[in-house]
């Protein structure tokens, strides 16, 4: 029997609340507000977000699958003891799959797509607003990923990139400049229809991102 429209609406709303809770918990973890081994206060999280505990519990289950949260029976949910290598490995996996996406996209992106990538790269270079850079960066990589025309790759990339919280961005001028240079080189490789170079440059881009992420977490006292 078909589910009533009202039922679908409730389910959709519940999914949105779960995503909001998961995003906030990720932010707190990577901002150093909840350190490894810390028990997650579900009541406090729910109250701060103005929601019930149910979506918070569902978010913790999802985050457990990402390796960010460890759930211990009869004790509760705790921030996982993430190591520096765990962080680097996450970016390495993201880089490997993103590299494959760039390799495939080099043969499928249209001239209009390439022009859009150039525009996005320019807009990132011309702004100093880190949140705007993050938004443009998302659009830049998403356009390349969609060029794979592979539902499986796109789904995996969405999962991996979704585990990196919004606002988690290294603001050091040298790091930003390095990332922007990477984008230009990636666009040039894609425009040159050089699949191997596009893959290598993209993998390197994310590997460096992993090293910067570890350095940023060090600065925030994540492992103290």
Image (tube, rainbow, N blue to C red):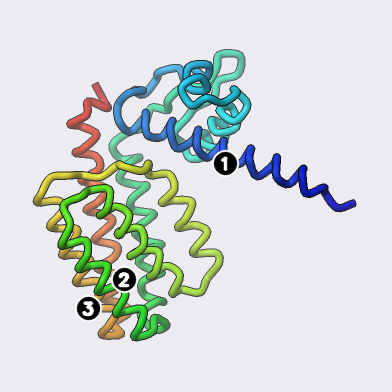
Which is in the foreground here, disc 2 or disc 3?
A: 3
In x, y percent, where is residue 42? Answer: 52, 19
In x, y percent, where is residue 175? Answer: 14, 51
Secondary structure category for the residue under label 2: helix
To which quarter of the image does residue 52 belong?
top right
| Residue denoted by label 1 | 16
177 displayed left or right of 158 = left
Whole-angstrom CA distance, mark 3 to mark 1, is 38 Å
121 displayed left or right of 30 = left
Q: Which is nearer the N-term, disc 2 or disc 1?
A: 1
10 Å neighbourhood of mark 1: few (<14), some, or many (≥20)? few
Q: Which mark is residue 188?
A: 3
To which quarter of the image does residue 18 belong?
top right
Residue drawn at (77%, 43%), measured in percent from left and top? 7
Residue drawn at (27%, 83%), measured in percent from left and top? 191
Whole-angstrom CA distance, mark 2 to mark 3, is 12 Å
88 displayed left or right of 64 = left
Q: Which is nearer the N-term, disc 2 or disc 3?
A: 3
| Residue denoted by label 2 | 199
Which residue ends up furthest to the right in the rendered image?
Answer: 1
């Amino acid at each position: 029997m078909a589910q009533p429209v009202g039922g679908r609406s409730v389910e959709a709303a519940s999914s949105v609340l779960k995503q909001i809770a998961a995003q906030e918990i990720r932010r707190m973890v990577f901002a150093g507000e909840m350190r490894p081994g810390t028990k997650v206060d579900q009541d406090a999280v729910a109250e701060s977000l103005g929601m019930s505990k149910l979506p918070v519990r569902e978010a913790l289950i999802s985050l457990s699958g990402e390796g960010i949260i460890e759930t211990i029976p009869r004790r509760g949910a705790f921030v996982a003891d993430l190591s520096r290598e765990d962080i680097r490995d996450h970016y390495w996996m993201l880089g490997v799959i993103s590299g494959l996406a760039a390799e495939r996209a080099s043969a499928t992106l249209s001239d209009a797509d390439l022009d859009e990538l150039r525009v996005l790269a320019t807009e990132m270079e011309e702004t100093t607003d880190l949140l705007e850079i993050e938004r443009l960066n998302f659009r830049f990589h998403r356009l390349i990923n969609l060029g794979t025309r592979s539902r499986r790759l796109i789904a995996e990339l969405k999962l991996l990139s979704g585990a990196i919280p919004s606002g988690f961005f290294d603001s050091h001028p040298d790091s930003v400049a390095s990332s922007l240079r990477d984008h230009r080189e990636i666009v040039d490789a894609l425009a040159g229809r050089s699949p191997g170079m596009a893959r290598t440059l993209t993998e390197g881009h994310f590997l460096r991102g992993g090293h910067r992420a570890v350095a940023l977490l060090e600065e925030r006292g994540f492992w103290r």
